[in-house]
Image (spheres, rainbow, N blue to C red):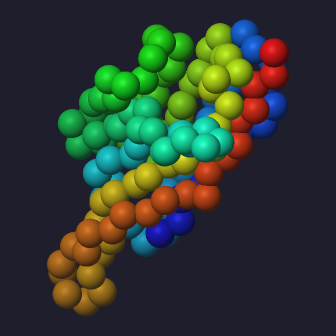
């Protein structure tokens, strides 16, 4: 299972940015896809988690001004993180965490997995 984040880069304050997280590989089912961010010198912070089975997105209560964020999925293998009115404080590495099941080879069983992408850097300049 491979997880890849794309869409990062430099952006001016007040602008917008859309990040994508795509999962590939031999997957039976994806259960959740979550976006995190980590600023320099800080712990990684959960932004939101998408439950593909329930078709719900839950945002972390610790995220301030989360009305600037919109996280969704295509209910298949991609989750997007749309940010508007970005600020220098949004500068961070944004990572995607995915969990689900892979098919057990020849067993008929489902094998749970959890995987992280490498992250994508977002830098907001004032």
Q: Position of residue 16 (x, y in %)?
A: 69, 18
Q: Reply above or below: 14 against 105.
A: above
- Left or right, 100 with respect to 107, comes to right
Q: Position of residue 56 (x, y in %)?
A: 27, 30
Q: Position of residue 105 (x, y in %)?
A: 30, 86
Q: Would residue 7 be visible to someone looking at this image?
A: no
Residue nearest the viewer, comparing 125 with 6? 125
Residue nearest the viewer, comparing 119 with 28? 119
Q: Reply above or below: 113 against 93.
A: below
Residue in the image at 57% along x and 25% along y: 82
Residue in the image at 22% along x and 73% along y: 110
Residue in the image at 67% along x and 46% along y: 120
Q: How many marks?
A: 0
- Left or right, 38 with respect to 8, comes to left
Residue furthest to the bottom in view is 106
Residue in the image at 34% along x and 57% along y: 99
Q: Quadrant of residue 122?
A: top right
Q: Reply above or below: 84 against 19.
A: above
- Left or right, 70 with respect to 89, comes to left
Q: Would residue 2 be visible to someone looking at this image?
A: yes
Q: Position of residue 62 (x, y in %)?
A: 37, 25
Q: Reply above or below: 39 against 105.
A: above
Residue furthest to the front in view is 41
Which image quarter is the C terminus in? top right
């Amino acid at each position: 299972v491979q997880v890849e984040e794309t869409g990062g880069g430099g952006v001016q304050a007040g602008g917008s940015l859309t990040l994508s997280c795509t999962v590939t590989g031999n997957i039976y089912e994806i259960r959740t896809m979550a976006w995190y961010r980590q600023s320099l010198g800080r712990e990684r912070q959960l932004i939101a988690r998408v439950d593909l089975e329930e078709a719900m997105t839950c945002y972390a209560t610790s995220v301030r001004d989360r009305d600037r964020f919109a996280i969704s999925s295509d209910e298949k293998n991609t989750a997007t993180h749309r940010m508007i009115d970005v600020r220098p404080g949004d500068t961070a590495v944004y990572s995607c965490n995915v969990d689900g099941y892979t098919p057990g080879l020849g067993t008929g069983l489902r094998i749970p997995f959890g995987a992280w992408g490498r992250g994508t850097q977002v830098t907001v300049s004032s």
